[in-house]
């Protein structure tokens, strides 16, 4: 059974930092490209960052240079270090796998509950 458990969100002032975690189970973590998505209030879900099994990463333009994605195979966990946060980063953050052969489409139908990030101005 696929499961994603996101944590680490909270309320932070503009310019602040947060570190998110996502623990995955029920997937072959070592061979999965892992992805962070977010859903801003009133908007559709959007891709944030992705990391391959080999550690290569990619970022959406909106977060490039401020966010860092990483993974820890021993814990089946990915992380998202967020720095210089802006009010427009306010969203519920989710993780998933990347569907092979797609751009950054999610690979699993199951979604965790996400973790809320709120950045005040």
Image (tube, grey):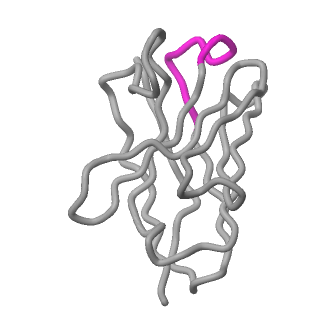
- Give the x, y percent position of residue 53: 71, 19
Q: Above or below — where is 86 with respect to 102?
A: below
Residue nearest the viewer, comparing 60 with 75: 60
Q: Residue at x 56, y 51 (%)?
A: 61
- Give the x, y percent position of residue 85: 60, 73
- Give the x, y percent position of residue 52: 67, 23
Q: Above or below — where is 73 with respect to 111?
A: above
The residue sitting at the left extreme is 42
Residue nearest the viewer, comparing 59 with 28: 59
Residue 30 magenta-drawn?
A: yes
Bounds of the magenta segment: 23-32
Q: Above or below — where is 35 with respect to 1?
A: below
Residue 28 magenta-drawn?
A: yes
- Give the x, y percent position of residue 117: 47, 67
Q: How many marks?
A: 0
Q: Residue at x 69, y 61 (%)?
A: 66
Which quarter of the figure has residue 118? bottom left
Q: Residue at x 39, y 26 (%)?
A: 105
């Amino acid at each position: 059974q696929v499961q994603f458990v996101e944590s680490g969100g909270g309320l932070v002032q503009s310019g602040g930092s947060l570190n998110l975690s996502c623990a995955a189970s029920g997937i072959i973590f070592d061979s999965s490209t892992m992805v962070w998505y977010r859903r801003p209030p009133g908007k559709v879900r959007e891709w944030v960052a992705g990391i391959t099994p080999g550690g290569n990463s990619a970022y959406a333009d909106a977060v490039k240079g401020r966010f860092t994605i990483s993974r820890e195979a021993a814990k089946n966990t990915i992380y998202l270090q967020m720095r210089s946060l802006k009010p427009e980063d306010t969203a519920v953050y989710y993780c998933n796998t990347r569907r092979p052969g797609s751009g950054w489409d999610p690979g699993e139908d199951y979604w965790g509950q996400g973790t809320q990030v709120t950045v005040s101005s």
